[in-house]
Amino acid sequence: MDLIRMKNVKKVYKNGVTAVYDLDLTIEKGEFVFVIGSTGCGKSTLIKMLYRAEKPTSGIINIGGIDVAKLKNRNVYKIRRKIGVVFQDFKLLERSTVYENVAFTLEVFGIPKAEIHEKVLKVLDLVGLKHKVKNYPNQLSGGEQQRVAIARAIVNGPKLLICDEPTGNLDETTSLGIMQVLEEINKLGTTIIMVTHDTDIVQRMQKRVVLLDSGRILKDYEKGTYRHEAI
Amino acid sequence: MKLFRMLGRNIRDSFKSVFRNFSLSLASISCITITLIVVALSMVLSANVNNFADNVEKDLTIVVFIERGASDEIIEKLGDSIDLLNYVESKTFKDRMDITKEMIEEDRTFEMILSKYTRENTPVRDEYLIKVTDIEKIGEVADNIRKLDNVYGVEYGETIIDSLITIFDVLRKASYISVIALVLVTAFLISNTIKITIFSRKREIEIMRLVGASNLNIKIPFIFEGLFLGIIGTIIPIILTTYGYVAIYQHFNGQVFSPFLKLISPTPFVYQTSLLLLVIGMLVGMFGSYRAVKKHLKI
């Protein structure tokens, strides 16, 4: 069953640059998809449109029944509550503890304290950071910070997890650890779309690979390995 | 229940945030404190200038000189006719012999002149002293009294009073305008300081948006934060107003230079001013935060 359906999606920035041309893409529930391509190929624009940080110029982006392209600015939260986003620079609240960072998402929804406590500890356990609940982000390593960011993104049980180069700032071993966590989350049923430049990771994971070039989908491998034609 | 839970969280978070971003909060609080001290000063000045004007105006009286030889009945009738006029608040009759006595008491030299006269041939006339409800209508009332029978003359110090009324009117308007202008400038200054404070937390707002907080979810904690900043910022102005004004009042014995220029009694004046400062501080803090956070909600 489709979770994401993009049809004729085009994005032209105000400065006249076209980042994505008439893109069609369908992603099913539970899939793990890598989006790869060289710098400037439009992969960041593509995922930014998914969590509505960018609005497409034309086309349809349907995620779980919501037409993201038509969402008004004040209603953007409706889609963001259904998806989790993980960034290369983690985007953690520096002045909040690990626990507070993760709990923040649930607090926003007005979930009771006891339920928040239970869910936060469960998800921190999943990413292997249950023992660091009281630490602040600057007291953690890069890999640990990314795990906190992942925990925050999935604590609400989203159907879709968008990862924008989550291993971009991490060394190889740490990156593999992060990928293990993501794979586990995927096994639990969450669809994952991940933008990456990391050759090794794509090779190892053997998942679907969408290769973008100059704003167009060049290849879409079913169980792709990384091929040297991209990146 | 959910609403109360979220409200509670917002209040708790905004309170925490004031202390977590203490250096920035301090900038906003200082700005609120300094500007509100100026506002408090202008409010105290303006209220006292108005009070001076009111006191002087309250003492303004129209003196109606009654024709000599008017019988008690005629005088009473004249009084009734005055009562019927618009803007007349009260009237007091003064007998010519009482006036003579007062004049002598005030200045002994009158005794030599006036003691020669009897009730029948005294040059002093019976009078009505009239107070008006609206000081700006004093001239109109005087003119209307002049037209009545058995009125010899009407006196209210036309030229001085008219210019005094104009001066007071200008002073009053100027003081109101200056207080309003100052409050607006304060709002603008505080709003801009909070804007700078919030600009540094742009990332925090961005994250809030990304995890699915609605605009309202984001705005409310910042508005509460503005409210707390406003409340904290008014503490010093309120203390200064309360203790400062009482000290000034006691130092001057409640009047400046002459009994005409009476200061407003500190109670309940200082409490009213403090309450007004608190309300201004709270509103300006909330408005400043709201305006500042609104700018960052487009991510």
Image (cartoon, coloured by chain):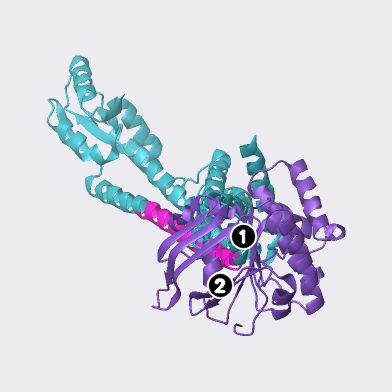
Magenta stretch, main secondary structure, is helix
**Residue beneath disc 1:** B29
What chain does badge 2 belong to?
A
The mark total stands at 2
Q: Nearer the viewer, residue A81 or A63?
A: A63
Q: Nearer the viewer, residue B200 or A96?
A: A96
**Residue beneath disc 2:** A44
Write down the region rendered in magenta.
B174-202
Q: Where is residue B107 drawn, in percent x and y?
A: 38, 41
Amino acid identity at mark 2? Ser
Do discs 1 and 2 share a chain? no
Eyeballing the image, is A176 above or below B118?
A: below
Amino acid identity at mark 1? Ile
Distance (Cα) linking label 1 and label 2: 41 Å
Eyeballing the image, is B261 above or below B75?
A: below
Is residue B60 rendered magenta in the image? no
